Image (cartoon, helix red, strand yellow):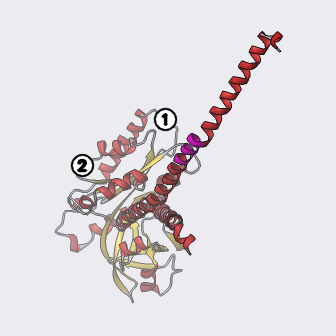
Amino acid sequence: MQKILKRWPILLAVLLALACALCFWRFWAVSNLLDSQRAAQRWKGTGERDFAQISCFMPPIAQLTLDDMYKFRNDMAQKLKGASYDIEKERGLYRDAWSAFRIVKVSNGRQSGEVQAVAVGGDFFDFHPLRLISGNYLRPGDVMDDRVLLDKETAWLLFGASNVAGLSFSLNGMPFVVAGVYEHEKDAFSRTAYGDAMTVYMSFSAFQRVNSTDSALANKVLETINTIACYELVMAEPVKGFTFSSVTDKFPNKNTLFVENTYRFEVARLIRLLENQISRSMTIGTFAIPYWENAARAAEDHAARWLAAGLLTAAFPLALVLYELIRTLVRGKRKLETDVLPEAKAKSREFIREQNRRRWERKHPDEF
């Protein structure tokens, strides 16, 4: 027992080292948990070219029109051209997606309910690869825009089943067809962020069509309704920070919350986040923040806390290792001074005396 008590610092260091490993494993797991934050990594694949993902969230009264978005695309193409990319021949340098939100009523004649509608455009489901239970995603090349992707809860509300692709229903009184049924993300951050809301995805063009015939919007200017609330892009990144600086420079609406998704879980950024917890908790301005960004912000805070815990638990084992190293060096120095060096000096003196004696004997051979 006394031996164990004498070794308590080592035992504590081992326990803290295990805790440190657990903290850093959790930090890594949380940092790589959300698919919505990893579009650049997926787009890069096994290639050598780097990409960066940027999200742009706009306030409700100053959102982006489709014309603004098309002009911005051209501006980004010129940025890539200025960075020596051959935009005419090289494919896959730029991908984008956009979305808008409103509450709609869905019905199949027997059952009905209000759900959150997310109007999407571009390669939205490349950024947000929701898990399909049945059917297919909405794609930019779809010939018809009357297809809607339902979540599992809405499918059960309307049809009492999840394998309902191809069935008809109405959305705000207009006919639509089920494209497929998806399941919400299972991670705790996403579940908390979207709560109990039922959510369907429809094409942006169908969203505009629904808005234009909605009598509830008759007194509102449609140009302020049929606008983009969230714009996301993945672009080639010749040097770190190129995409973010290009977007903030050319984006039509400067009153926008820009998020650099690619680097948000880097250690240096999370340490800065820990240093600025007070300002982090305060949002200046009102932005249309979708649930996936709220989930990412929660995961970001969680990862920062695991990182801090890992660094703190690593401090004592590292300090103990450093202490033992210094103590070993000091002991070695003492042994060197008290044992090794005196013995070496004695042997050196004896060697020198022996060499001097032999030289003297060679010079005076007759004296022996």
Mark 1–mark 2 distance (CA, rounded to whole Å): 28 Å
Instruction: Describe residue 65's horizontal placement relative to residue 83 as left or right.
Output: left
Say which amino acid is labelled 1. Asp
The quadrant where residue 73 appears? top left
Check residue 294 for magenta coloring. Answer: no
> Could you classify mark 1 by the number of other residues whose Cα lies within 10 Å: few (under 14), some (14-19), or many (20 or more)?
few
Question: Which residue occupies 48% across, 68% down?
Answer: 130
Say which amino acid is labelled 2. Lys
Q: Which residue is mark 2?
A: 254
Q: Which residue is mark 1?
A: 86
Q: Nearer the viewer, residue 218 or 227?
A: 227
Q: Position of residue 199 (x, y in %)?
A: 38, 74
Q: Nearer the viewer, residue 288 or 52?
A: 52
Image height of 23 relative to 265, above or below: below
Mark sitting on residue 353 = none
Q: Nearer the viewer, residue 126 or 344?
A: 344
Image height of 167 relative to 279, above or below: below
- Label 2, secondary structure: give it: loop
Quadrant location of the N terminus? bottom right
Q: Tell me which label, 1 or 2, sits earlier in the chain.
A: 1
Instruction: Describe residue 103's horizontal placement relative to residue 328 as left or right.
Output: left
Q: Nearer the viewer, residue 23 or 178?
A: 23
Q: Position of residue 271 (x, y in %)?
A: 36, 54
Q: Which residues are magenta?
A: 330-338
Q: Position of residue 123 (x, y in %)?
A: 45, 57
Quadrant location of the C terminus? top right
